[in-house]
Amino acid sequence: MHILLIGCTGFVGEAIIFKLLRDTKHKLIIALRPKNGKSIEQRLHEMLDSVRLSYPDYASRLTPVKVGYTDTRAIVISERDDAYIKKKASVFVNALADVNMNRELRKAALNNTVTALNWMAKFQECKSPRLYLYLSTAFVNFHRLDKGEVPEEILERGMSAFTLRDILARKHSYIGRYENTYVYTKQLTEVLLEEAKRDKRLVIIRPSIVIPALEAPYPGWGKIQTISYMILGVGTGILSMVRCPSQSHKNTVPVDLVADDCLNVIDRDQDDGQTEIRHMCLTGNVRTWLSPESFTILRRNAYEYFVVNPLILQNRQLFPFKVEFKAGWRQILLTLVVHVIRMVCHWWKWADTWEDLAHILCKSMLFTYRFDRHLARFGQKELVFKRAPKPNDISYPTVAFEECYFEFVKEFQNAVGYDSNIVNLFF
């Protein structure tokens, strides 16, 4: 079977590619764009290197195809590659997403919604279309509840093709109570894919916050995103304070379990034309996964590790600042003066000049603000993403959350490397 992978150059996508190559015999067609001066072949090699696979071992099962997009997100592809996809591909896996959570709505809709619909149209033109697998987000219903179980269904009834039309025409810019344009356009994509699938099989997988791997390709394999930014903050000392109510749930899932779920969907025969939605989150499903103390334990272990093994960026050692967890803005305001004094005392030993010190303090406060605004808020509710048993379901792990994540901490210097985006956060 030939599987077309779209947008699989990111964190989840690379895990899916790893699982498909290692655990199946399927042939993969990988849609890629040249980027940062690198050809699609170079990018494919780098992707396999990142998951510790050797390209020559799998070359016979890999077909990279060069794609591009117009300003309106029409797919640009050669006639030869287009004909090859239509003839061979029976499964489309779409993990493409603009993860900038506060992108301007029209651009977010182009990137997340229009692109997904255009690939659905391409899927419908294939000779033997079997499955369109779309990776959404568990947080599409996040704004509707403050506590309880989040249902595995599309609750939105106010979206349609007219919504997308008005967004693209700049007649619609309101996202209501949705957390951000990313979540809003993911929900819009779900609604419109449901309408566009016709009689074909559509499966929507809704991962919650994706964190480093439990086992594959190796324990702790991860990228700098979502909760990993908290570890970045702990390791560098740039994250100073986090809002973390004691009763909230941190809804997380290891990346290799998301990939496992995708494989289960692909390998399970079902041809009833029904849309299936699958939450992918461990909160509420495994008692040992996220205890109320988990984040405290993780922060403490990470802090103690980086004190002994300080990160090095641009040949400078970065000793961590012990991040504080507060329940709300009132607690933060009450402790702010003392907190700032502690920050000055910490960074004075590192800074070379007063200007340097002021720069670091501003960076720290800005990073803390952005982390709270974009990421920490998704742990501010008592929501549980339970999921009904599914055919051929995965086995949930019993390993504790902090044990899984601490493997990532040990690999953190390699994960940070010399990424210019990471360096710019600090310097």
Image (cartoon, rainbow, N blue to C red):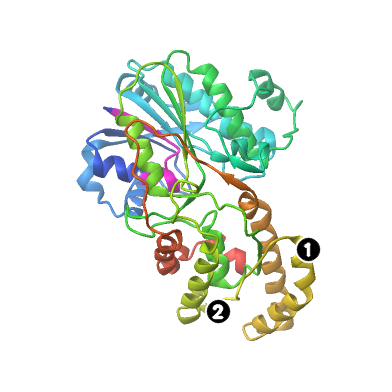
Q: Residues within 10 Å of mark 2 (few under 14, many from 20)?
A: many
Name the residue located 70 percent from the left edge and 27 percent from the top edge. Answer: 167
314 relative to 56, above or below: below
Residue at far top of view = 199
| Closer to us: 161 or 140 | 140
The amino acid marked with disc number 2 is: Phe
| Residue identified by numbered label 1 | 330
SS category of the residue bearing label 2: loop
Q: Which residues are magenta?
A: 2-15
The amino acid marked with disc number 1 is: Arg
Q: Is residue 73 visible?
A: no
Q: Residues within 10 Å of mark 1 (few under 14, many from 20)?
A: few
Residue 202, magenta (yes or no) = no
Name the residue located 31 percent from the left edge and 19 percent from the top edge. Answer: 87
362 relative to 253, above or below: below
Image coordinates for residue 124, horizontal then vertical, percent:
43, 16
Image coordinates for residue 186, horizontal then vertical, percent:
58, 34
Residue 10, magenta (yes or no) = yes
Q: Is residue 75 left or right of residue 351?
A: left
Name the residue located 37 percent from the left edge and 17 percent from the top edge. Answer: 126
Image coordinates for residue 392, horizontal then vertical, percent:
32, 33
Q: Quadrant location of residue 218?
A: bottom left
Separation of marks 1 and 2 at Cα, in angstroms: 28 Å
Q: Is residue 311 left or right of residue 371?
A: left
